[in-house]
Amino acid sequence: MSAQRGLACDIVVFGGTGDLAMRKLLPALYYLHKDRHLHAETRILSLARAKHDIDSYRRLVQRHVSQYVTQGDFDPTVWEQFAQRLDYLSLDVSQRVAFPRLAKALGESAGRVRVFYLATMPNLFAATAKHLASAGLANDNARIVLEKPLGESLETANQINDQIGTVFDESRVFRIDHYLGKEAVQNLMALRFGNALFEPLWRNAHIDHVQISVLEKVGVENRGDYYDNAGAIRDMVQNHLLQLLCLVAMEAPVHFEPEAVRNEKLKILEALRPITGMDVQDHTVRGQYSKGKRAGEVLPAYYFEKSVDHDSNTETFVALKAEIDNWRWAGVPFYLRTGKSLAQRKSEIVIQFKAVPHRLFPQGSDRPAGNRLVIRLQPDESISLSLMAKSPGRGMALQEVDLDLNFADAFKRRRWDAYERLLLDVIEGDATLFMRRDEIEAAWQWVDPIIQGWQDCYRSPKRYAAGSWGPDAADSLLERLGHAWLDERS
Ligand code: BG6
């Protein structure tokens, strides 16, 4: 085997039998191994309470990795090599006495980087960090990776961050938001800051409004336990959607390095106009899916999903109107929307430009006047810019045409999964695409009053049929200002 890149390190996955480890982390590590991005001496140690010997654990991982990597990418020979890196320890991470066993299994660190990846419930984060320290494992070469959502409010996030901070200084804490690892999301930065074309137009003088949608077809699947406490606002809005909003709205950082990028994102979070009191009802919509149908398939109601309370009031859908109080964005609505069990899977950012100031030509289409830039993150990464062109034939009727850039066509190389990129960044100690503590706090500061407003009004979430586009109220939210979600609804 030829020399492999990267630093030799130990990657310790807490929650090693969980959904995230099986669906995302281990497949990503398999790809990193396959593409020779892991040092030959890098080891992976998974931890969970379940009893497994190494063979049964490797079989479990093999089953999932072969299922979750792209068809044709699973190579039994590569798998055999990868499996040699993989070890398993059955351990109850809530128990301090378990950690000396972990220290023993890891052996001498000899200056190796150690990545402790906490793919567990956030209520275990603080105790885990403390136990790592008590077992002498939180040394200068150790990094801790925390999955979102971090806490369930500003207060609980602060408690966790304070406790983690007593063990790991900020430079060794990697708060992950996997949306920042997506190629298409980084492309948004490339588009904005690598091209001079858009910058002069990227402001309220020219932009009418922005839409950010992360729509999913899947329901809560096997994550009812977690999701029923979190809901869409904590699961998606507080992190993924606000991070996307930051990347659309932030000023150009001076350097592409962690503090510069995160300073700019923070300014946007701090400029978000608070949504409080009665405004919560006006500016936000929360929904929950009831029984429905998609392509003939009957889809269950949320409250019939596994581990979900039958009386649950948890929202599986949120739409809201955000406003950014700064010079660049004053007066431009940013509509955010996310939900589960919807008609389509699609994540996209729509930048709707203003119409021409004076219309010379008749317009043939019923689409809103004004150019539109659509940055599609999923399912197909693409950027499309709508322009007005003359419709062929007599007269000067205009019609909208799209300039399309599809990344799969433009770059024939395999697209990395977000977790591959982010795991490599952690190994290399690059925190640019991770959230700093103050970003998390500013995001909670904005989200907490919305949750409070929902609780204070005692209203249940609006029902929407599974397989639909969400509650009608989400459409009305935009109609009030003469806008509409850019969906191709049948
Ligand atoms: C996770 C959420 O962070 O993101 C999930 O917890 C959601 O509920 C997922 O399904 C969506 O990620 P992606 O990459 O599939 O869009």
Image: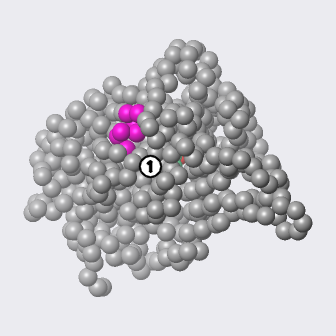
Residue 39, above or below 338: below
Q: Position of residue 438 (x, y in %)?
A: 30, 37
Q: Secondary structure at mark 1?
A: helix
In the rendered image, residue 4 lying in the magenta stretch gets the answer no
Q: Residue at x 28, y 33 (%)?
A: 160
What sort of colour scheme is used for the picture?
one colour
Residue that numbered label 1 is attached to? 247
411 up-or-down from 182: above or below: below
Instruction: Please identify the dominant SS of the magenta region.
Output: helix
Which span of residues is magenta-colored? 265-271
Nearer to us in this view, 353 or 382: 353
- Which x, y percent locates residue 52? 36, 55
The answer to if 266 sits in the magenta stretch is yes
Q: Is residue 447 left or right of residue 204?
A: left
The amino acid sitting under disc 1 is Leu
Q: Nearer the viewer, residue 75 or 255?
A: 255
Label 1 CA crowd tier, 10 Å (few <14, some 14–19, many 20+): many
